[in-house]
Image (tube, rainbow, N blue to C red):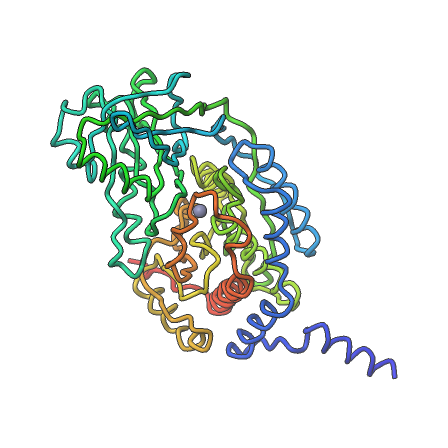
């Protein structure tokens, strides 16, 4: 009788349902676990609705550190700890305002300060506007922009199915537009939001003044896509219209914050580390449910599934919730710095930072041998409609990692809707679909498992 009870308990616990040698079966089990008993959505709900926006240096960012640490502890991992990191502390201040001043007609348009921007004067800034399609066109204008507001209006190219390509082709005007315009004597910049959709949400994001002196800094803001269309059309009929905007953001002293780390220690080669992670900080305009609450809870779900199945990894599997991806990348850099000090050896890193949409595959940074190896897993993922295994950027937090032989991958979800929400006030919990989020977590768990089982290809010694 007792024996029967014990056996039943073992079967129910999943211990015996996990077959070390059957990849197809095990992957099916990961998807089943994710779709039937995942904690990812519950975690995301708390991060989004109970905590909210988590910009680096904010109190909410600290609450998110505390919460995810306690949740990782509840999973019974081998280790859970915090890693100290100093992060920038930029605050938006009161809500921005902006108007197109076309003769006697004054039209309000939605803007938001870009991260790291300086404030305007307390009374705001008013100037004529010069529209450009990018930094190259700005350079051609030279000192014609002196005393004016430069309006960067290059839209994201709708022809690319992979929308990150369109983002990459535009984002320089947001990141470096103010710096370049300031060099030519402009007094401010307004940047079209990185959004394929026409709507009323301004999208913030990081910008940098580079090596300018503080006296050279000019205020910079994003305008909604509808606002950009209106400004551009009005400029065509009245090139000498004026634009007014007011913002009161400022940069405060750096703040002590943390990366949150949990570990399942390897049972064969514990010195070989496999990282799975996302970033805990978000922009301040909304909850950051897609960017990157989704990646955080998916990464936590990966270790939850493996632990729950009593999987004994060969290598150490480490979940890392990075701080400060959005406006500094300090968490990723600190993680690598500490890893170097400890002489750690990373063989694999997987990041989820492209939203919690239906997974389509992975964006891979690897040599030919390892790329081929991961592409060889394709058939195992095909039943889950995950089939895109291509070379590409894996993730900015893991970009710092420099172990001798390391394979990096980024979860690649369908990207059609990502830029509807990215860095905007609508990046909220209801923007994330529960099943899509869970499918991403299962996809990540499957790749971690496969590479843990098979190891990576080491470069041939010369
Ligand atoms: Zn992100």
Residue 207 in view of the camera: yes
x and y percentages locating residue 345 in the rendered image: 47, 51
Compared across the picture, whether 33 is left or right of 328 comes to right
Quadrant of res 241:
top left
Residue found farthest to the front: 104
Compared across the picture, whether 191 is left or right of 55 comes to left
x and y percentages locating residue 203 in the rendered image: 39, 41
| Front in this rendered view, residue 99 or 102 | 102
Q: Residue at x 49, y 43 (%)?
A: 339
Residue 341 in view of the camera: no
| Front in this rendered view, residue 69 or 205 | 205
Relative height, residue 290 to residue 26 (above, below): above
Compared across the picture, whether 402 is left or right of 84 comes to left
Q: Quadrant of the N terminus?
A: bottom right
Q: Residue at x 34, y 18 (%)?
A: 214
Q: Quadrant of the C terminus?
A: bottom left
Q: Residue at x 35, y 36 (%)?
A: 222
| Front in this rendered view, residue 369 or 48 | 48
Relative height, residue 142 to residue 367 (above, below): above
What is the total number of numbered labels drawn onto the structure image? 0
x and y percentages locating residue 41 in the rendered image: 60, 58
Q: Residue at x 70, y 56 (%)?
A: 76
Relative height, residue 314 to residue 200 (above, below): below
| Front in this rendered view, residue 336 or 105 | 105
x and y percentages locating residue 309 in the rendered image: 65, 68
């Amino acid at each position: 009788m007792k024996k029967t009870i014990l056996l039943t308990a073992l079967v129910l616990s999943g211990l015996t349902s996990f077959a070390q040698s059957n990849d197809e079966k095990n992957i099916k089990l990961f998807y089943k676990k994710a779709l039937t008993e995942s904690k990812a959505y519950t975690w995301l709900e708390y991060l989004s609705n109970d905590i909210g926006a988590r910009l680096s240096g904010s109190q909410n960012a600290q609450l998110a550190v505390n919460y995810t640490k306690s949740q990782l502890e509840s999973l019974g991992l081998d280790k859970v700890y915090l890693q100290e990191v100093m992060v920038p502390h930029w605050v938006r201040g009161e809500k921005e305002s902006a108007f197109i001043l076309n003769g006697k007609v004054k039209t309000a348009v939605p803007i938001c300060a870009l991260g790291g921007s300086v404030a305007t004067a307390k009374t705001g800034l008013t100037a004529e506007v010069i529209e450009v399609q990018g930094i190259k066109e700005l350079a051609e204008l030279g000192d014609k922009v002196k005393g004016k507001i430069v309006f960067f209006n290059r839209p994201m190219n709708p022809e690319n199915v992979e929308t990150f390509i369109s983002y990459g082709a535009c984002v320089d005007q947001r990141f470096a537009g103010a710096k370049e315009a300031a060099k030519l004597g402009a007094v401010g910049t307004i940047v079209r939001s990185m959004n394929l959709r026409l709507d009323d949400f301004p999208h913030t994001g990081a910008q940098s003044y580079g090596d300018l002196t503080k006296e050279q800094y000019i205020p910079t803001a994003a305008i909604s896509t509808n606002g950009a269309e209106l400004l551009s059309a009005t400029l065509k009929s009245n090139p000498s219209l004026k634009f007014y905007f007011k913002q009161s953001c400022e940069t405060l002293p750096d703040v002590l914050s943390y990366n949150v780390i949990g570990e399942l220690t390897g049972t064969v080669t514990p010195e070989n580390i496999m990282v799975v992670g996302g970033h805990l900080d978000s922009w301040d305009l909304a909850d950051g449910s897609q960017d990157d609450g989704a990646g955080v809870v998916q990464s936590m779900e990966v270790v939850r599934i493996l632990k729950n199945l009593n999987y004994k990894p060969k290598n150490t599997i480490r979940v890392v919730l990075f701080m400060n991806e959005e406006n500094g990348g300090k968490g990723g850099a600190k993680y690598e710095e500490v890893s170097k000090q400890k002489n750690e050896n990373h063989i694999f890193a997987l990041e989820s930072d492209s939203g919690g949409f239906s997974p389509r595959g992975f964006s891979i940074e690897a040599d030919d041998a390892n790329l081929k190896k991961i592409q060889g897993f394709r058939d195992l993922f095909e039943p889950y409609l995950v089939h895109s295994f291509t070379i590409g950027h894996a993730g900015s937090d893991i970009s710092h990692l420099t172990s001798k032989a390391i394979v990096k991958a980024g979860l690649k979800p369908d990207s059609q809707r990502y830029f509807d929400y990215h860095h905007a006030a609508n990046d909220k919990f209801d923007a994330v679909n529960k099943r899509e989020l869970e499918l991403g977590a299962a996809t990540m768990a499957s790749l971690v498992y496969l590479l843990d089982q098979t190891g990576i290809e080491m470069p041939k010694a010369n």
